[in-house]
Image: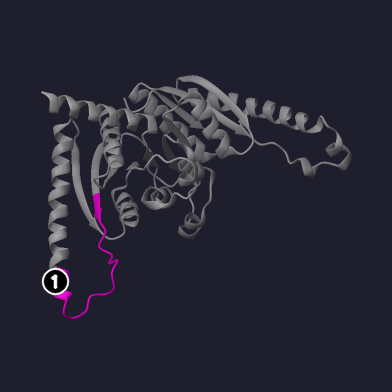
Amino acid sequence: MFVSKIMLATDGSPEAERAARMAASLARALGSELHVAHVGHVASLYAASETEILDPEFQARLVERAEGEARAKLDAEVAKTEAIGGEVAGAHVDVGRPDAGIVRIAEGIGAGLVVLGSRGMGPLRRALMGSVSASVVRHFPGSVLVARGEGGGELPGRILLALDGSEEASAATRTAVEISNATGSELHAVHVLDTNPRLPYPGPGTWQTWEEELAHAKREARTWVDRQAERIEAEGGRIKDAHLRFGEPDGEIVKLAEELGAALVVIGSRGLTGMSRVLLGGVSDSVVRHAHCPVLVVREPERDRKHDLTDARDEARQGASS
């Protein structure tokens, strides 16, 4: 199973309603527990009068009031989620910064997937966005599904899986196949060969060699993509089409998802900790920011990857001794 616990982080917005539909649908299809969380806002201490600020119990009252409002909001969101067919196994509340609260709750309950909404914005605002959803993607050590409000998002539908040959993409592949099979969704795969030159523009004497190498790389990439599709089919997946694109990986993935009218993009990302999370950029981060449909960033928890490595080493030792 992809995840045993799915946590919907909601604030009652239209984008959160889309996230709720996806979370409820995935929980039913995958047989996962569905939890709902809401992080309430604490009013600024400095917006009060000087007399109130000096009261040592004033801040505690602010937090208590925020918690009461957050619980009332959470109850309403749980009722909405149940009304659309979600079977809620647990409801959780926190107050403070939304991104920090979402990560704190999800880690506390052992959720493997966080589902939350993100506002659909124009290209420039997307590029500059520093939103709650982007922060959760960067800081939560598990998988995150960001549901946008610009179309797509209904399963069954078309699922676009991004492949690059990495361990993270392998985890994304397993997830995409499981979701596709469970929901009856059409599965597409894409690999993007980055053809943007990283070296100085080739001179006249090297141009022909450069073109020949590029043509060879394209043929090799096509062969690799076809083999990946065959492997996925052999392991129980059903690939509708295996696409090969050329250019910037993030831009081509977003463009193809829009062309297909994808309901979901599935992409892998490394599980990072500490400062590495803060500095994280890369393809998955960019796709989350720019896609016109929901994006599932698959990240295996560090402990799971360690177990996989241990199992692999044990198998290698057994093979060597036999």
Where does the magenta region start and end? 191-211
Which corner quadrant holds the C terminus?
Answer: top left
**Secondary structure predominantly adopted by residues drawn in magenta:** loop
Q: Is residue 61 left or right of residue 37?
A: right
Q: Does residue 168 appear anywhere in the picture?
A: yes
Which corner quadrant holds the N terminus?
Answer: top left
Q: How many circles with numbers are drawn on the protein?
A: 1
Q: Residue at x 15, y 35 (%)?
A: 233
Q: Which residue occupies the extreme front position in the image?
A: 321
Residue 193 lies in magenta, yes or no?
A: yes
Disc 1 residue crowd, few under 14, some 14–19, many 20+, Cα 10 Å? few
Locate residue 99, reporting x and y percent: 55, 39
Locate residue 232, reporting x and y percent: 18, 36
Locate residue 298, reporting x and y percent: 36, 38
Q: Residue at x 81, y 32 (%)?
A: 58
Q: How was this image coloured?
A: one colour
Q: Nearer the viewer, residue 113 or 239?
A: 113
Q: Which residue occupies the extreme bottom position in the image?
A: 204
Q: Which residue occupies the extreme left position in the image?
A: 322
- Report helix, strand or loop for mark 1: helix
Residue identifier under label 1: 209
The amino acid type found where label 1 is placed reads: Thr
Q: Residue at x 40, y 42 (%)?
A: 294
Q: Does residue 83 appear anywhere in the picture?
A: no
Residue 132 lies in magenta, yes or no?
A: no
In the picture shown, does residue 167 fall above or below 6? below
